[in-house]
Image: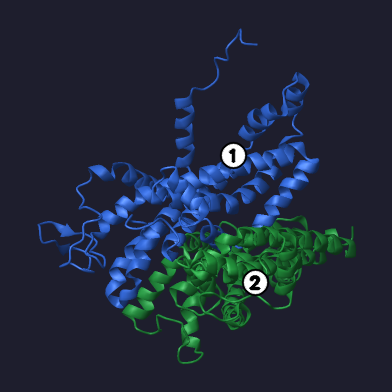
Amino acid sequence: MTDFTLTARPSRARKLLSAIGLLRESPIAIIGLCLVLFWVLIAIFVGFLPLRDPLAQSAGDLLKPFFTPAPGGGYYWLGTDDRGRDILSRLFFGTRLVLFWSSLATIIAYSVGMLMGVTAGYRGGWWDEGLSFVGNVFLAFPQMVLFIVILSQLGPDSPAGHWLSGKGFSATWVKGVTIVLAVTFATAPQVARIVRGLVLDLKTRDYVSAAEVRGEGPLYIMLVELLPNARGPLIVDACLRLGYVTIAIAALGFLGLGLPPPDPDWGKMISEVRGFGAMAANAMIWPAIAISSLVLGLNLLADGLREIALRD
Amino acid sequence: MITIAARRLLSMALIMLVISVLLFVFFEGDKLNLAARVLGPYSPMEGRLSWLEHNGYNRPLVTRYFSWLFGFFTGDWKTSAQFSAPVYTFLLPRLKNTAILGSCVFVLTVIISLVLGVLAGISESSRRDRTITVLSVLTTSVPEFASATFLVAIFVFWLDWLPGSSSFSNGFSWQELILPVATLVIYNFGYYTRMTRASMAEVMSSQYIRTAILKGLPYRQVIMRHALRNALIAPFTVMILQLNYLLSGVVVTEVFFAYDGYGKALYDAAMFGDVYLILAGAMIAVVVAVVSQFISDVGYTRLNPRIRFQ
């Protein structure tokens, strides 16, 4: 089998180029991609930007409107929050946190969900019954209720939290791990349901029978034959799902159940200044715009990708 | 039909049973931790032990589970540590408030998304269709706490038309209901609009609609009589499932507007670590979700003749 190589196979770079070329056909996907890329680039290069310290407080500049001259020269481009911290720099440094935790949670939830779904779909029988039942149990919870149940019991002061802190995890990590766990419980069953449906269709294909006849094990068939061939719809769904997870984690931040202070989390930035009424309007609006634009980007990208996929 | 309903009912009951066991073990399994939660972190150990003894926590876990489950169905939801009041009497008026909010949101979402979805679906890829689709993507991308921020900035701070808090401190008022309802409707209608649009577009391209148009029926009659009936089956059943998603958004929205409902009570309980209140709240949410799922499943088989006559 390994004696001859398939020379006609397009290289990886070639494939990437053609994918971008495809994207060009859908202006919606391009707009989405630009919005997402903007935030990704901010997250990567935020350290090189000439920004103020996101944690530095300035007692003389509380809740300033946008484009206010700062005392040490320069401007508070987007104004300041209730402790005189620069909103622009908090927003940009917060991007790292938002993108890191929502991507991590999505990746883990997706991996668990794909494994559940492909097992349920391919093995069928009791595997299917059992996994679908477990999924239905967690899907019966409204997502935010499930989050509250898990986060209230497994928080930093719970035995599980103490155990994690004892292992040398910082407060942010203890909370982050609990959030990832909660997101996984809420999201993996939904992913599993989609994957199961796709696999039920794919497993009747000839290449699966061929692999079975070759004597490949079920694990090989599930991971090498089935999952890669289900990737089209899953990429679209993953974009949407990342958007939902971002919203969920930011909502937790808003509720004060998210990452501990003083890390600049977009949801928390809104709730911190909410008590100041009309004076805080400026400080509340920017994080709201930030999260909306990021999620909008992901949704538009998913939409454009779906449109392209349907066209072929 | 009856057998399908009975089978669904059985599986729903099983799911509820499993969830009740999970929730009970999760919250009350570790009884020392529970005592610490109820009596506070600085309560002495002897106090916790005698509290456990006094409240029957030294009985076996299985006995405790059944007595708890019996208590849940008879309205004995124990006492909230935070409000020193029975959870049942505390939660009931708040559930009523949330039911008011939820039903307003539900009715408005259904009307808006059906109208927009049908308008978009009957003329696929027209300018109207594109506008509605973009609008629905835009609004579903704005999470509740962000759209609430925008609404408050515009209608409270800038125009000063509406109150920014909905605590009903001077009794019930419709004005205080507008912003929370708007927040939830804005976030929710997009998904159902797109769902209705897809369903409508599919029906419009089917053979029997073409036949109806070709045989000369008025366009209006084709839409109202032939298309709508079939196009609305799927969206309608999904909308009943919406109750589950709605409860998630309700927590954030109620906290934002200080609306004294179920979601805010659950949130306060989570911040305080009020175990019994969270436990009862979670059970109620699951009952609502499972029952709405059941109604949706049975409704689907009832509405869809292809399944009904099998």
Residue at 49% x, 48% y is A163
* Residue denoted by label 1: A232
Give SS at disc 2.
loop
User: What colour do you see for chain B?
Assistant: green
Of the numbered discs in the image, which one, if any, rests on residue B55? 2
Of the numbered discs in the image, which one, if any, rests on residue B114? none
Image coordinates for residue B90, horizontal then vertical, percent: 58, 81
Residue B156 falls left or right of residue B167: left
Q: Is residue A13 visible?
A: yes
Q: Nearer the viewer, residue A219 or A149?
A: A149
Image coordinates for residue B25, horizontal then vertical, percent: 66, 58
Residue at 81% x, 64% y is B9
Image coordinates for residue B204, horizontal then vertical, percent: 69, 59
User: What colour do you see for chain A?
Assistant: blue
Q: Amino acid at mark 2?
A: Asn
- The answer for which chain carries disc 2 is B
Q: Nearer the viewer, residue A275 or B140?
A: A275
Residue B105 falls left or right of residue B216: left
* Mark 2, other Cα within 10 Å: few <14 / some 14–19 / many ≥20: few
- The answer for which chain carries disc 1 is A
Above or below A24: residue A297:
below
Quadrant location of the N terminus of chain B?
Answer: bottom right
Residue at 46% x, 36% y is A21
